[in-house]
Amino acid sequence: AEHMETNSRETLKADFDAFDISEELGFLLEEPLTSLPDYYRVWLDLANNLTHLIESHTLRDLVHKMPVLSPDFLIDHRELRLAHLVLGFISMGYVWQEGQHAPAQILPKALALPYWLVSRRLGLPPILTYADSVLANWKLKDPTGDMEIGNMDLIVSFPGGESCRGFFMVSLLVEMAASSGITVKKLFLFLDHVDPTAFHGTLRIFVSGWRDNPMLPRGLLYEGVSNEPILLSGGSAAQSSTIQCFDMLLMNESLFVHLVSVLFIDSAYLGSFLTRMREYMPPAHRQLIETLSVCPSLRDFILSHSSSDLCQAYKSCVSALVDLRNYHLNTVAKYVVVPGNHARAMGCPLRGVGTALNETGTGGSSLMVFLKSVRNTTQKALILERPSASKETEM
Ligand code: HEM
Ligand SMILES: *[C@@H]1O[C@H](CO)[C@@H](O)[C@H](O)[C@H]1NC(C)=O
Ligand SMILES: *[C@@H]1O[C@H](CO)[C@@H](O)[C@H](O)[C@H]1NC(C)=O
Ligand SMILES: *[C@@H]1O[C@H](CO)[C@@H](O)[C@H](O)[C@H]1NC(C)=O
């Protein structure tokens, strides 16, 4: 038995490595680097001073003076991830420095070309993703100390002070909790540090992309890369592999995608939204979700074994996901819908800004309908019906 256990641990370790996940930290990047070879100093100088450079409206000028650096001296995965992170933050700052009404239409070659090449090597799109701003954007204040929230900080931030920090930190905590099991409510308490007005008015714009965004309807031109503008969505926790893995484990994909598209009005666009967000995940993480989606379904297994212990365990997992999505719905109302309505009433609509989903002037209602339909779909998985002729519901 001991031999078998060693064997299965080794297999598990090999699986973790293949999908680029860590036993302790899940999808978080382990020990992210905070510096690059000296040749890239100009990138780090801009990224480390980003808030100041945006607020003083000097970032664009400095980018225009930047040399076109070759990414060939970046060797290992963590160097590439840090390069993708800093180029992402600088690009967002560059595009949105003058606010939502005056985005840059062209990303200069000194940013666009190395960013595109680094992205291609990582299999990530050339835009700031959740894999950058959350998974690879953390450091320990005291490097000899523990990995607990008081000892953790972001590597790169946007304007917005504590609200910016709190916004990214809460997602970081969710990712940490996914491997250790802190409760949902306790986690979201961290949002007490995120002021809805600061979030909506300041931070949101810097995570906005150039797809379904009326401010950049044709996308962004990456100079030196392509002659046509490119359309890419902004960063969002919808790009979290953790939540999609839970979905795949607990509900099989066909059930999930089918229910979302039946429940949602504009199914062609939105039913595919969560699937499209996988293109913004590191390829190894995306691969895990795809592998889970074709594995024999856990749900079917539970249905075929009438064990009430198994059913109970299954239901408490699904309930936790429903709770998370309910809590999240309130969060989106507080941070997106309410301040959005307020801004509209003041005559300054923020349409399409800061969400990967387009709200297209509906006051965020399609956004809420979407999130509710995902929640409702999760809730339906609580009903365990036998696949046989008998239609009785097992409780
Ligand atoms: C202030 C905090 C937050 C705000 C304002 C917010 C906002 C949003 C918005 C607007 C969407 C719709 C998709 C999009 O437009 O990108 C979304 C989706 C999503 N968010 Fe958040 N979010 C917040 C925090 C979180 C956290 C901490 C998590 C946990 C990891 C999370 C997980 C998700 C997931 C998984 C989706 C996809 C829909 C689903 O699977 O239910 N969000 N969020
Ligand atoms: C940030 O930039 C400002 C203005 O260019 C400069 O005064 C300041 O010293 C810089 N700070 C850092 C940490 O580089
Ligand atoms: C979102 O935008 C796309 C194209 O910009 C449009 O075709 C689609 O109808 C919009 N969807 C919603 C729900 O507004
Ligand atoms: C979700 O379910 C609730 C209550 O069960 C219902 O009122 C609501 O209309 C449903 N929403 C969607 C988008 O399916």
Image: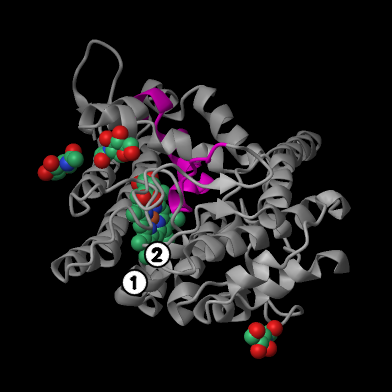
Q: Is mark 2 within 8 Å of ligand 1?
A: yes
Residue 320, percent from left and from top: 36, 51
Residue 371, percent from left and from top: 28, 46
Q: CA distance from mark 1 to mark 2?
A: 7 Å
Query: Which residue carries the number 1 mark?
Result: 201
Residue 82, percent from left and from top: 71, 60
Residue 250 in the magenta stretch? The answer is yes
Which residue sits at x=31%, y=46%?
358
- Please tell me which residue lies in front, 325 or 218: 218
Report the amino acid beneath label 1: Gly
Farthest-out residue, top: 389
Relative to 107, residue 43 above or below: below
* Left or right side of 126 for 278: left
Query: Which residue carries the number 2 mark?
Result: 204
Q: Quadrant of the N terminus?
A: top right
Can residue 280 be seen at all in this image of the molecule? yes
Q: Quadrant of residue 305?
A: top left
Ligand 2 placement by image quarter: bottom right
Relative to 12, residue 207 above or below: below
Residue 204 in the magenta stretch? The answer is no
Report the amino acid beneath label 2: Arg
* Colouring: one colour
* Left or right side of 95 for 21: right
Which residue sits at x=64%, y=37%?
283
Contact between marks 1 and 2 (CB within 8 A): the answer is yes
- Please tell me which residue lies in front, 221 or 77: 221
Q: Quadrant of residue 385?
A: top left
Q: What range of the chain is rendered magenta?
A: 228-256
